[in-house]
Every structure is written in C-alpha cells, then in structure tokens.
Amino acid sequence: MIKKGSHMKISCLPKEGSRLLMTVLIEEEPWRDIHTKIFGRQPLLPESDSLAAFQEKFKKLEYVKAKKYALDCLALRSYLSIQMKKLLKRNLVSEETIEEILQECTRLGYLNDNEWLEGFVKRQLARHTGPQRIICQLMNKGISRVEAHKYVEMYVQANTSQHSIQHLINTKYKTRNLADYREKQKVFAALIRKGFDIQAVKDALKVEE
C-alpha cells in the first residue's frame, strides 16, 4: 500500500532478450513494455502517488513522444494512415494514443491518404505498370481490394492501358519477332505479369482466341 503523500516506486529496465524494448515496473512489478524508438534508452517517467495518476501522466507522455516520432518519420517520407498505424503499433504505442495521433496528423495535413494514393497510382502508371499489378501493390500496403480497385479505376482508363502496352511493345519488346508464335507468347506472358488486363494484351498483340 502506498503511503499518502509518498511517491510510487517507478523504474524502467531493459527487457531480457531485446535490445530495443524496456519494461516499466511499478513497485517492482512489471507494468508494461515500451520501445526505445519512442521513449529513448533512458526514459524519464512521471512520478505519482497512485496508479491512476501515473497512468494519466504516462498517457500524456506517450502521446507527446509518439507524436514526435510520427512527425519525424513523416518528415522523411509520406505514409498512408494504415502504414503509420502499423509502425506505431509495432513500436508498442497504445491503440488509443495511435488513434489520437492519426487524427491530429490528418487534421494538420501530414497524413493525406487520398493524396498519397493518387500520387502512387500516377507514378506507377507513368512507369507503365499494369492496373492489376498496381492493385496488388496497394493491397500489399494494407489497402483493401475494393479500395485499391476504386483508386486504380479512378485514374486508369482503357486507352491509358492500351497506350502503356503499346509503349512497351515499341520499346522494351521491340527486338522480339512478334510474327513468331513462341516469341509473341513470351511477350504476352510478360505483359500479363506486369498487371495488364488479359483482353487488353490480346487486343494489342492481336492474339486470337
């Protein structure tokens, strides 16, 4: 029992078996793990005379530290909200704090999923990446298939795909003899792997059913 007016004994020790994690102890009992990427290797934890008071102070400290970490990451490159959420979660930030940080970063304009997705899709199209491959790339980043398809469809038109396919045929595959069946099949397979629609590739290569 904590005497009135006295502070709880709060300490922080390296977590056994991990170079990056530390364990917060209250009255020498493990309370929770924290990550050095958020709190540093010598965290200054708040003094408190009750568990409730400590939890309240810790929550505020976690928000400040985790927000700074998020902003530092965003200064280096852009992130999707779902990517930032995974990053903070991986560094042991609490769910409540993560949601507060995501909301604040979105409000300030540091996180903008629509802008990120538009830029990503347009960059991939400029590289003549096929729609299906772009969708797969977005899904690998945590975007649902429905959302990925929606954003790709928003910026991809049939004539854009045909233009990209024709561009590749005229450049990357210009040395291939498309009059030769086997050569044409190799180019066909390569274009499909790049994520282009099967029918669009057939039309461009004039492949018969």
Image (tube, rainbow, N blue to C red):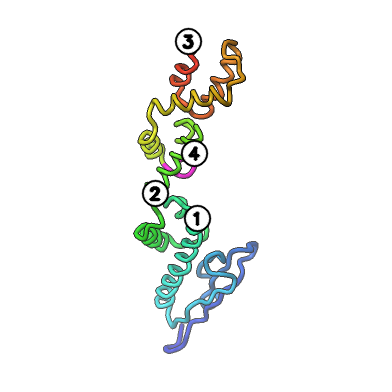
Q: Relative to the observer, which residue lies in front, 55 or 171?
A: 171
Image x and y of residue 23, in percent: 56, 69
The residue drawn where x is 57% and y is 15% is: 184
C-beta proximity under 8 Å, tags 3 and 1:
no
Tell me the distance, in whole angstroms, between the alpha carbons under discs 2 and 1: 16 Å
Residue marked by disc 4 = 137
Q: Residues within 10 Å of mark 4 (few under 14, many from 20)?
A: some
Count neighbours of disc 3 (C-alpha within 10 A) and say few if under 14, some if 14 to 19, many if 20 or more.
few
Disc 4/disc 3 C-alpha distance (Å): 30 Å
Residue beneath disc 3: 208
Secondary structure type for disc 1: helix
The residue where tag 2 is placed is 113
Q: Residue 19, located in which quarter of the rendered image?
A: bottom right
| Tag 3 secondary structure | loop
Inspect the image, locate mark 1, and give the three-letter code of the amino acid beneath it.
Leu
Instruction: Look at the image and say whether residue 142 sits in the magenta stretch.
Output: yes
Note whether 195 is above or below 112 in the view shown: above
Range of residues picked out in magenta: 138-143
Q: Position of residue 66 (x, y in %)?
A: 47, 65
Q: In front of the other: label 2 or label 1?
A: 2
Q: Quick one: label 1 or label 4, which is nearer the N terminus?
A: 1
Q: Is residue 118 above or below residue 157?
A: below
Instruction: Please identify, in this view, whether the residue under mark 4 or under mark 3 is nearer the observer.
Output: 3
Q: Amino acid type of disc 2?
A: Asp
- Pointer 2 or 1: first along the chain: 1
Cα distance between the residues tagged 3 and 1: 48 Å
Q: Which residue bears the numbered disc 1?
A: 87
Q: CA distance from mark 2 to mark 3?
A: 41 Å
Distance, label 1 to label 4, CA atoms, is 18 Å
- Nearer-N-terminus badge (4/2): 2
